[in-house]
Image (tube, rainbow, N blue to C red):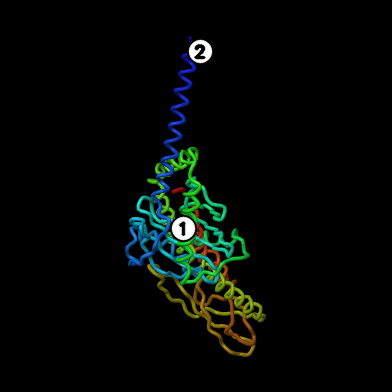
Amino acid sequence: MLLVHLAVLSLIALSAWLAWRSRLVAAGRQALSQQPETITFSRVPADQWRDPAMAEWLSVPLREKGFVDLGVYAVLPLPDFRIGVMINERDKMAAFLCEHPKALGISLELNVRYVDGTTTMLINRADRGVPRPPFFRVIHAEPDTLSAALYERLLRERASFGIKTITAENVIPEYQAAWTRMMLWEKGRGLTADEVAQIAQRRRSLQEDKANLRPQTVASQNRRAAQILVAVPGIIFLSLVLHGSFADYQHMRDAQRRAEARTAQAEGTIVEVHDRAHRVSRYPEGSGVFVAASGREVRFFNADPNVKVGMKVPVSYDPRHPDNYSLGHDLSGFTGLIFGNAPFFVMGLFFLFLAGMLGRRKA
């Protein structure tokens, strides 16, 4: 009797499992039947993006890489579906900015078509589990990856032979033909119960992440902008250090050449002392004269705080140019190099350190 009960329960469970799988296959068939086999592009104003900031963030780096805008289109009969078309004829690559009403933000598709009818596409969204035909190769990337980096990646990973030339005249017909070919393949193949379950599971995971995807993208852009704003003062400070160091080095070299020319010695005499104001303080300054070997009297100044009239001062001078004299060592260039540039150097490193720390922060 127990075995009979177990057999009945097993048959019930098997029937329920088969019915569940049958419902999954039917749901997959219905989902595919709702997808049009042909699509039409209808030009719309460029300001009809629901997220114009995201569209600009994706398209600007592509323009810098040589892409040209061909406009924004509504895709019929798909409701509220927008697609921006760009091409790079030099690299034979097309870019499609796709804004789906049920998706978050705008996804970027970079396409390369081949003369044998195959396509290589790089898209900045996760794999949704939908089977792809053998003539359609898809590369997935993270949503917040810069479009310029996606472009460089596709250049590296695509097959370089047999690429079809893409122009403004054929890029949209090529997209429409690829859509029709893919829909016919998917509808002819159908979806298994396991594939429908996998697609549903991945869709639930994407919906759970939907609230975080856009803030992370915005935060990533804000961090880059903050890094630039913080790094710019650091670069300016370090530029001032470089300029100041070069000027001080030139001064020190000039001071060294002048000092090497002071080969003659003389004794000067302080003939006058007066007070000199400097900011809020006053200090004595003496002026005196010494007689060069040529008989010329040369006037000099002495800032010694103990200077007195009649005080004798040893003087070194250039016998050819007595105005090049010295009462001691000239370290103004060295002290300027150390004390004048150090604050700018420290501030420059500080701002660059802050910029680096901003780049390490997680969104």
Tell me the tag on residue 180. 1
Give percent across and percent down for residue 335.
55, 67
Q: Residue at x 64, y 85 (%)?
A: 319
Give percent across and percent down for residue 202.
46, 42
Q: Residue at x 55, y 79 (%)?
A: 269
Give percent across and percent down for residue 261.
65, 81
Give percent across and percent down for residue 21.
46, 34
Q: Residue at x 53, y 54 (%)?
A: 138
149, above or below 297, in the image = above
Amino acid identity at mark 2: Leu
Tag 1: Cα neighbours inside 10 Å, few (<14), some, or many (≥20)? some
Residues under numbered marks 1 and 2 in contact, where contact means CB atoms less than 8 Å apart: no
Q: Give the farthest residue toward the top.
A: 1
Q: Which residue is mark 2?
A: 3
Instruction: Please say whether residue 351 is visible from this viewpoint.
Output: no
State the residue in front, 259 or 245.
245
